[in-house]
Amino acid sequence: ISGKQADGTNTEVANLRIVSSGSDYAFAGLFARAENANISYITVSGTMYAYATSTNGSSVVGGIVADTSGKTIIDHCNAGTASRQLTVQAHGKNMAYSSTNVDNLKTYAGGIVGIANTSLYKYVYSGSSWSYQHVYEAGTTSIIRNCDTVYATIRSAKNNIGGVVGFASSTSL
């Protein structure tokens, strides 16, 4: 997907309702995952919820992208507008927001990005099986710039919460 407003204004995706649940991982955002992507001039509003039903699961939510990896660039993106709110919530183990029963659960919530990570997801052979793993490559940098959290409510049932980024790993912001 590519494109840009000719006059430099943002494309607004308004009144979204995104609910994501999964046993081990739940990702909610305009984009669930972005790797080596360039995303710019987007504004989002509405509600986004993620909840992992497993005791050891991860709930990740970000207004623009839930989980970025590699050389992703996010530029001139906004969470909410002056008149429309964005609500992002990384829940516990069910749809109802609760900070109880989240002992081993990991939650990440950010207005723009839930998790910003410079690793790449690669299919790797380890031992006797293949699996996706985080692989770090030297010189990989994610960039998040010129982004605003204008009118947003951001909640995380356990930890890792931020107005722009919920959690940054091996990332320079």
Image (cartoon, grey):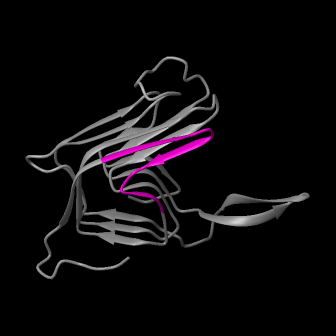
Q: Position of residue 156 (x, y in %)?
A: 40, 32
From the viewer's side, name the closer residue of 41 and 50.
Answer: 50
44 is within the stretch colored magenta: no
Q: Which residues are magenta?
A: 17-33
Vertically, is 60 above or below 3? above
Which residue is situated farthest in the top direction here?
100
Q: Position of residue 150 (x, y in %)?
A: 16, 48
Q: Position of residue 89 (x, y in %)?
A: 37, 36
Which residue is situated farthest in the left direction here?
83
Give the side of residue 143 with respect to residue 106, left or right: left
31 is within the stretch colored magenta: yes
From the viewer's side, name the closer residue of 8 and 17.
Answer: 17
From the viewer's side, name the closer residue of 145 and 35.
Answer: 35
Q: Position of residue 127 (x, y in %)?
A: 90, 57
Which residue is situated farthest in the bottom direction here?
6
Q: Which quadrant of the figure contains the N terminus?
A: bottom left
Where, by quadrant of the figure, is residue 163 drawn?
top left
Where, by quadrant of the figure, is residue 48 drawn?
top left
Give the side of residue 70 with respect to residue 132, left or right: left
Q: Which quadrant of the figure contains the C terminus?
A: bottom left
Vertically, is 71 above or below 80? below
Residue at the image position 64 percent from the left and 32 percent from the top: 56
